[in-house]
Amino acid sequence: MPILGIMASQISGHLQTNSYESIATVNASGTATITFSSIPATFKHLQLRFSTICSAAPTIQLSSNISLGTNTHQLIGDGSSAIARNSGVGPYGLYLPSDTGLGMSANNPGVGIIDLLDYQNTNKNKTVRCLYGCDGNGTGVINFLSVFWNSTTAISSLTLTVGSGNFTSGPFALYGIKG
């Protein structure tokens, strides 16, 4: 029986290595708000990668419209239990991890990847998915969530805001994914 990794390593000529393009990187240390503005409309999807520590769960605002509703599906695991939930969480919809209850510290930042699918398509509502986690030396967590944003508006900016306090560390890197 072949090992999949070995089989995949034999693939040649079909892999795209230039599908991701860096748009911007922000060091969030010491600030409560991060904004990626004037996002180019030249990609199929967006991806935000982060490694951060913050004192309260940050939210993401898509473009400037915060009046539209969202719905979230979430799976959370902490090594001893699992939680699944579906909730309408208000106008922002996406909450990133904070050190509250997760065991984050300078040695254990929260890391994650957020995909904003079809961010420029004005013919359909937006979907955001996020995978993030933190190893808190026995108190860590992994979280997968998807967010439905009830809007066909193209996303031209992202704003991350900490509810109280500041981001105490962390790069946030925004990438465009070619279609």
Image: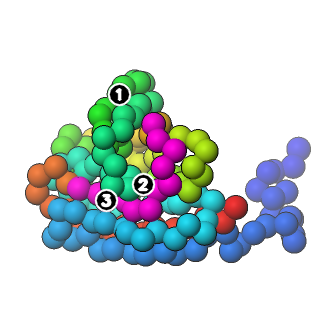
**What residue does disc 2 label?**
112
Q: Residue 149 location, x and y as percent?
A: 44, 40
**What residue does disc 3 label?**
159
- Amino acid of disc 3: Thr
Q: Main secondary structure of the magenta part?
A: loop
Within the magenta stretch, is there residue 158?
Answer: yes
Q: Are marks 3 and 1 in contact (CB under 8 Å)?
A: no
**What residue does disc 1 label?**
88
Q: Residue 99 location, x and y as percent?
A: 21, 49
Q: Residue 134 location, x and y as percent?
A: 34, 50
Q: Identify the mark at residue 149; answer none if there is no mark.
A: none
Which of marks 1 and 2 precedes in the sequence? 1
Query: What's the residue at 30%, 40% (across, down)?
Result: 67
Q: Quadrant of residue 54?
A: bottom left
Extent of the magenta region: 150-161
Which of marks 3 and 2 precedes in the sequence? 2
